[in-house]
Amino acid sequence: SPGTTVTIYALQQGAPGSTPSVVWSRDDLATDRIVAGALQAGGLVFVGTSDNQLLALDAESGELVWEFETRHSVWADPVFGDGVVYAASLDNFVYALDLETGDPIWQSELGGSIASRPVLDGEVLYVSSFDRAVHALNASTGEELWRADADNWVWGGPALNEGAVYFADLDGHVYAADRSSGEILWQEQVAGAVQSAPLNVDGRLFVAAGDVAGDEEQRGGRLVAFDAESGERLWEMPAPAPVFTAPAQAGDSVVIALVEGAVLRLQVFNSESGALEWTFTPPSEE
């Protein structure tokens, strides 16, 4: 909520299992929640805020080096490459900024808000948007190279392999698009809404989804694995609550995080068979 105390911390990791120490903290830079993850690059830390700002802080001291104002909240993690920071906002714009000064290089307006981290690969920036599409932009100019359309908002970021871009929408449609043209290669369906990026690992595409309608106590989630090339459904495993975070790779396993009631859980599945390997619930502070 606006007006709350929002603090940015730099932590120093100690011995394994010990509590990190605070190197510096700043509670004077943001007054609304910080949704985006921080990015560290070139001796700076970049933080997007719901106050319509991208902040650049000195990583060692926390000193504010520069700030850039957007027209709406920044929920998407920034990315960088070749001296340029790319930031996306709920104001429908993607911004390319000079890493050292924050001076704008270009800005490109899409047709909807952007809530997820863009993916930079070489000279192309891939951006998901609430305008029901994924856009491929020229990273040097911001010019749109192509767009791949979905049936509903694309909240989560895209995933890439050598030939395809993968993404999913809030209706649970999962898409594979050609990286050079945006042409849809295949489309499949999962139950529930997808609000996170798919995970592409070793020829498999993992998609997490959650129910958003009906009785809250009856809502569940699921992790679904597809063949990345053909779209064939390989397996589907249920989760006890909706899954709105992106799956992560851990060796030969896939990890999902979910909140069941007020309890955080991690579930770990075998990536090949889908078998549930183990579940972790952090101990209560009590």
Image (cartoon, rainbow, N blue to C red):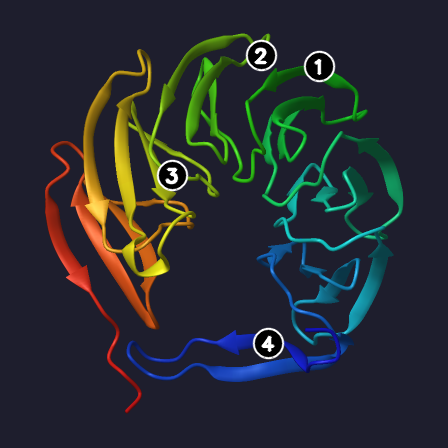
Give the percent coordinates (x, y) of residue 216: 36, 58
Determine whether 117 is above or below 20 in the image: above
Which residue is depicted at the point 34% across and 30% down?
A: 190
Image spot of residue 226 (x, y percent): 28, 24
Badge 3: how crowded within 10 Å, few (<14), some, or many (20+)?
A: many
* Residue 230 seen by the camera: yes
Q: CA distance from mark 4 to mark 2?
A: 40 Å
Of 31 and 161, nearer the camera is: 31
Q: Is residue 181 left or right of residue 210?
A: right
Q: Which corner quadrant holds the N terminus?
A: bottom right
Dot placed on the residue nearer the N-terminal end, 4 or 2 = 4
Q: CA separation, marks 1 and 4?
A: 38 Å
Q: Disc 4 designates what residue?
A: 9
Of the residues shown, which amino acid type is indicated by label 4? Tyr
Q: Which residue is mark 3?
A: 192
Q: Earlier in the sequence, mark 2 or mark 1?
A: 1
CB under 8 Å between callouts 1 and 3? no
**Distance in Å between CA atoms under marks 1 and 3:** 31 Å
- Evaluate if marks 1 and 4 touch, with contact meaning CB atoms under 8 Å apart: no
Q: What residue would you read off at disc 2?
A: 182
Give neighbour class at mark 2: few <14, some 14-19, many 20+ (Cα, 10 Å): some
The reply to whether dot 4 and dot 2 touch (C-beta < 8 Å) is no
Identify which amino acid the numbered label 2 is placed on.
Gly
The residue indicated by pointer 1 is: 145
- SS for tag 3? loop
Q: Nearer the viewer, mark 1 or mark 4?
A: 1
Q: Nearer the viewer, mark 4 or mark 2?
A: 2
- Count the marks: how many? 4
Given the image, on which type of amino acid does mark 1 rest?
A: Leu
Q: CA distance from mark 2 to mark 1?
A: 9 Å
> What is the CA distance from the residue labelled 3 to the residue labelled 4?
35 Å
